[in-house]
Amino acid sequence: MHNRKATKGSSSPTQPSNSNKNKGKQIVKQKKSLLQEHEDCPDTLIVLQHNPVYTMGTGSSENYLNFDVKEAPFDVYRTERGGEVTYHGPGQLVMYPIINLRNHKMDLHWYLRTLEEVVIRVLSSTFSIKASRIEGLTGVWVGNQKLAAIGIRVSKWITYHGLALNVTTDLTPFSWIVPCGLRHRQVGSIKGLLQEFQSSRQYAEAIKPFTDDYQLIDISYRSLIKEFSEVFNLEIHQKAITVPEFWREDH
């Protein structure tokens, strides 16, 4: 596979879910227009943190909400992705690849497994956390804890939505739903796992650089970009841009 170039900007603050959703749909529409005109269709990557929000997939059941929608603790949006309800909020890095799978591999199973691979590499290379997949389920797990949720939509081989990695996320809002419709599974975060490791002298020194939330988010963000670029065979270059941030690929 040939190597492609991409440009990226610096980390973004929290963004409202609806504004990002509309912007993302505009990008998808633009890419479809380029394809219809037989023009080059570059890839785009959006990475951000959301303000607190619950999102549901197209076929999500309200039975997985532990509250009345009219009295929801946060906004609830029904999106175009697959899967059940999940929570997004500060401390969680959300990655939206809007890419043309014609330039990669036209295989949705491959795409899902590749997104999982990005997170597995981040956890291993940056935090020495051994993560894995669970057969029959989508996402990235450490034991019984789900650290990354994945939900996608694909139209004319253009992808939208993506993955959410819990870094320093307050996990309390997950207790008000049945995350991803899995009643007997837990939700975890990188910070939570590192705190568990602190009780072990073996990990004490290695964990010190990750005790500050801001640094932990920044390190995770940089690692996500690095691993994404390697797994999808991209050469990414820094570019100063405004939020929400975009990584545009030039073929």
Image (tube, grey):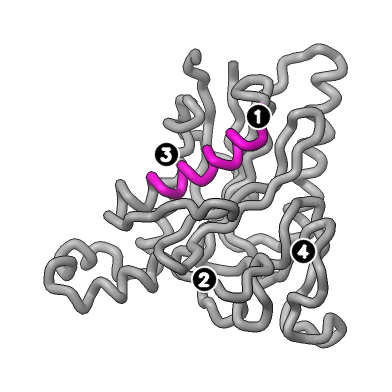
Question: Sequence-wise, which precedes: disc 2 or disc 3?
Answer: 2
Q: Are marks 2 and 4 in contact (CB under 8 Å)?
A: no
Asked if residue 84 shows in the view, the reply is: yes
Question: Sequence-wise, which precedes: disc 3 or disc 1?
Answer: 1
User: Which quarter of the rendering shows the C terminus?
Assistant: top right
> Residue visible at 50% across and 51% down?
11
Q: Which mark is residue 56?
A: 4
The mark closer to the camera, 4 or 3, is 4
Q: Could you say where residue 206 lies in the image, as x and y percent from the top left?
A: 19, 62
The mark closer to the camera, 1 or 4, is 1
- Residue named by callout 2: 187
Question: Which kind of residue does numbered mark 1 sit on?
Answer: Asp
Q: Which mark is residue 227?
A: 3
Question: Which kind of residue does numbered mark 3 sit on?
Answer: Glu
- The quarter holding residue 201 reads bottom left
Q: Which mark is residue 107?
A: 1
